[in-house]
Image (cartoon, rainbow, N blue to C red):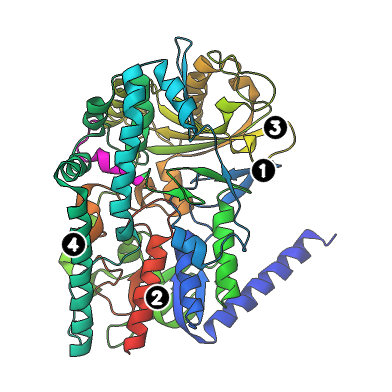
Amino acid sequence: MWPLKSRCRTACAAAAKSTLALSEKKWDAVVIGGGHNGLTAAAYLARSGLSVAVLERRHVIGGAAVTEEIIPGFKFSRCSYLQSLLRPAVVKELELAKHGLKLLKRNPSSFTPCLDGRYLLLGPDKELTKSEICKFSKGDAEAYPRYENLLENFCKFMEPLLDSVPPEKLQKASSLNHRMKDNMYKSMFWAQLLQRAASMGHKELLDFMDLLLSPASKVLNNWFESDVLKATLGTDAIIGSTGSVKTPGSGYVLLHHVMGETDGDRGIWSYVEGGMGSVSLAISNAAREAGATIMTNVEVSKLIIDDSGRVSGVLLANDMQVHSSVVLSNATPYKTFTEFLPQDVVPDDFLQAIKNTDYSSATTKINLAVDKLPQFHCCKLNGGDAGPQHMGTIHIGSESLEEIDSACQDSVNGIPSRRPVIEMTIPSALDKTISPPGKHVINLFVQYTPYKPADGSWEDPEYRESFAQRCFNLIEEYAPGFSSSVIGYDMLTPPDLEREIGLTGGNIFHGAMGLDSLFLMRPVKGWSSYRTPLQGLYLCGSGTHPGGGVMGAPGRNAAHVVIEDIKKH
């Protein structure tokens, strides 16, 4: 084995040589950030014949879709932890299965234990789901298939929008030919949208508007009567949000999270073998095969603007310059325009709109290594092996919509929830590649945790530890002995997500998914087509249409816009 100093010198020399190679040529496109959207954009750009370099600040690619071995032998999906939203077009066009993507379907898909000794299992097995809901309400069991069918129809209506560039107005003078093509695209876009709306019928269209505009609590209360079913479904409406199930517009977030599919099965969430980093790895394999260069440990500090006011490359943290015809930023809109650029190069109203976007977060992710599976006292299915209760998302501390709202109100008042809403997943129940035999990886997606708590600081180790123990103690109420099974854990609070992953405010969507920040309004009004006020600069991350989650749509859509613009010149 080489001496440590020798290995370090060799690694540093190799990194310096690679960085030098970056600066010695002019690239067609440079992508800032090796998150899954940046990698997706790079893959499409490289496949079109462009020379592409992806520059990732961290030591590992993937951004929030990343696998990291924080505790030896345990591979954590450190941020995002489930797959469903990845667009089928991306999976098919980039041949991700060939590049190593393997999805593990979950059945049942969710388990909600109750303190009174009951529990609710839901999943793709319609008979199981019906009998489980019947334990709480026969009426709800009858209504549930109709509810699922309605959401599926809404998803079919929305889906074409996800894979489309918003019909944004042209921001600068263009040729007659380009204006005609643009007008034709917009006319076709709106005509197809109106055609789909008309096919829904008057009542279904009203139901759709009700879902978009209403609090999720209103939607669910109108459909169901049993608290545990409403709460289980309601968690989809608050994931990654600072809002409550009673917040107007939370119904859209609910719809956003049921919009995906796994291998053609709609609404089915899956684990990814090897963790969520395997999604990013498969996309990077496709990009590299197409000729893209992907580099880690390369930090961009500024964008280079030439004398004509056009972006012409990036300045690295080591003061080296990398020149390119265009730059795509997979960083958040806030980071892109406030950290990479001087204040006076974009219109003030645009910059203010970017700054005034809601980047707040109440999300904390805790990744645990445990020496045994949790044993739920309500469930007679317990044993040493993984059972149905361990396969899907386990909803802890959310037996009613009121409990979820109460947890949210704590955060509004400046303190982490006294009884947090926890989504627990145990990917190692299906994926045997991420933990040692007999041991397991557990993900806790926790809400609500304010960025700056009024009663302490996330920088204080004792404060952090006390909150982690609060979560473990809550799980202990449902699964006695859980705390003693914990070997170690990794916790990412909102400031940690900002510092480690680059998520402004800790917001997992690169900006809130409110109705005022979607479609033609994302990231800001007038600039939804991935272009920016700076020529040569494009956005390709979750802060653009259609938003957050491991979708790949922003990266794919942005790449198509860049390719179209390069062809024009």
Q: Nearer the viewer, mark 2 or mark 1?
A: 1
Query: What residue sits 34% from the left and 44% below the top?
Result: 152
Q: Is residue 356 visible?
A: no
Magenta stretch in the rendered image:
246-256
Above or below — where is 112 with respect to 24?
above
* Residue behind mark 4: 525
Q: Main secondary structure of the magenta part?
A: helix
* Residue behind mark 3: 439
Query: What percent of the width, then of the height, locates residue 2?
Result: 83, 62
Kind of residue sitting beneath label 4: Lys
* Residue behind mark 2: 327
Q: Residues within 10 Å of mark 3 (few under 14, many from 20)?
A: some
Query: What percent of the width, then of the height, locates residue 300?
Result: 46, 69
Mark closer to the chain start, 2 or 3:
2
Q: Are marks 1 and 3 in contact (CB under 8 Å)?
A: no
* Residue behind mark 1: 434
Mark closer to the chain start, 1 or 3:
1
In which image quadrant can residue 426 be found?
top right
